[in-house]
Amino acid sequence: MENNAVKTGHPKGLYFLFFTEMWERFSYYGMRAIFILFMTKVLLMKDADASEIYGSYTGLVYLTPLLGGYLCDKFLGNRRSIVIGGLLMAIGQFFMFFSASVGANGGVSLMWMGLTAIIIGNGFFKPNISTMVGQLYPANDRRIDSAFTIFYMGINLGAFFSPLVCGSMDFKWGFLAAGIGMLIGLVAFILGQKKYLISEEGNAIGLPVKKLDVKSIAMIIGSIGIIFFMLNFKQMFKSDVDIISYFIYGAMVAMPILIFSDKSLTKIETQRITVIFLLAFFVIFFWGAFEQAGASLTLFADRQTERTIFGWEMPASYFQSVNPLAVISLAPIMTIVWGFLYARKLEPSSPKKMAIGLGLVALGYVVIAIAVKGLGLGEKVSMWWLIGLYVIHTIGELCLSPIGLSMVSKLAPLRLSSLMMGTWFLANAAANKFAGTLSALIPGGEDGTGGATSFLGFQITNLYEFFILFIIMSGAAAAILFVLSSWLEKRMHNDHVEAKTNK
């Protein structure tokens, strides 16, 4: 009876990791919800400069897990990596608190220190806590899928509450709340790790592999120095060169060259890897449009969205809670829909699901473009237009996001699995950097007019034209991917296409 209870329920360690991850996401998303508003209102930056910094920050957040994952596997083990990462992120949030306290005079340097600590800390924390969820279970245990679903809810719960808490107060107190949230998760993890982080066989998981050597310590210190230098580059050298763009996009070009130069790849492996790279390319367009949530769409919510409810003005950052709430509400429905289609042999393949996701992002921008068409100087639109966009985008996210990681793990050759997963994170880094570049195109000024910008010859003089850019970009990407999907399915080879079932 006892043994059966263990097999049908989940180990306490899952809920322990759920709690830790929830607070880490509270910290990250709480800071992200107010970050661009802080730069434009407190540090008095131009929209374009703030958008570029936002893109560099979120882009680098996706790169550092490659370093953190490597050091964890070689030396630190999961537990120590999570403690180092959590501590660095908390320190980073406290630097953001000091930056907001100082303001425009001296606050920028403190912000660079804060961002560097958060970026490096995230690299240690993010890849390791997810890995530990799987380690709690025996190999091929059927409960692992539902365990990750529960864990994913923890992520979204933290992401839902944090903008409501951090966005409801002055910027400095918002950053302080994010730092305290991280400390709560960290202290709980340190106190409970011995008791809860054990496998069902009774073995401790996530222990250090071996002591750090001098080379690896130098690698950590060097990485901190490089990221701090890259964030500071423009200010230090009074330069317009965005070296973070060159770094991220350069890595995106170098990675396929590196992997395809491997002579041991078979024809089938080469075709499957080609599919991963092509889908990673399309994913950049999806997240580039989707991640406007923390950038241009937050500026739009602040300046041109009617947020007054019964005399109370809702903070602009509250809109950041719509997406995680919609994920929690809609994820079970999407699972039922895919199951229904699968049973009738109608479930779309991974490339087609991704094309649908891109199409839904375009549709979300159609909604907001209708709302702002002909919008006059200083006029505002109803908040329901923006909420509608976020709900449509969330359905798109549920079509595309869960499939990516699963597809990489299925298609990548085992000996290259870590490198291919790194490539997928690299695509996310490029997408977030691209999102910042696109956000910088928002027509300048508090009223969203004037200060015309252009992208590849497309002139943007108002918000309507700004949102049309996203419709064209993600709509065209969706159409091209849909046309290519049958060709991609062949190169995935039949056992990886969901729509094909055994008769």
Image: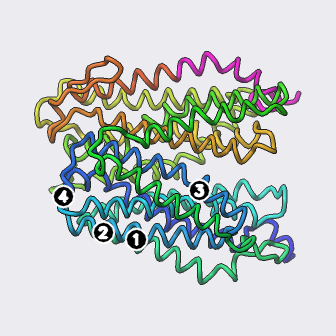
Q: Residue type at mark 2: give it.
A: Phe
Asked if labels 3 and 4 touch by Cβ distance under 8 angstroms, the answer is no
Q: Residue type at mark 3: give it.
A: Tyr
Q: Would residue 170 be found to the left or right of residue 472 on screen?
A: left
Rendered location of residue 362, percent (x, y): 43, 27
Of circles 4 and 3, the one toward us is 3
Task: Tell me what residue is drawn at x 48 percent, y 49 percent.
Answer: 60
Task: Tell me what residue is drawn at x 38 percent, y 63 percent.
Answer: 114
Q: Earlier in the sequence, mark 1 or mark 2?
A: 2
Q: Quadrant of residue 282?
A: top right
How many discs appear? 4
Residue indicated by mark 4: 312
Q: CA distance from mark 3 to mark 1?
A: 22 Å
Q: CA distance from mark 4 to mark 3?
A: 33 Å
Task: Tell me what residue is drawn at x 61 percent, y 52 percent.
Answer: 66
- Element marked by disc 4: strand
Of circles 3 and 2, the one toward us is 2
| Disc 2: CA contacts within 10 A as few (<14), some (14-19) or many (>=20) | many
Residue indicated by mark 1: 179
| Bounds of the magenta segment | 478-503
Q: CA distance from mark 4 to mark 2?
A: 26 Å
Residue indicated by mark 3: 152
Q: Quadrant of residue 201?
A: bottom right
Is there any visible trace of residue 399 in the rendered image? no
User: Is residue 307 shown above or below 362?
Assistant: below
Residue indicated by mark 2: 97
Q: Earlier in the sequence, mark 1 or mark 4?
A: 1
Task: Tell me what residue is drawn at x 49 percent, y 68 percent.
Answer: 23
Asked if labels 2 and 1 touch by Cβ distance under 8 angstroms, the answer is yes
Q: Residue type at mark 1: give it.
A: Gly
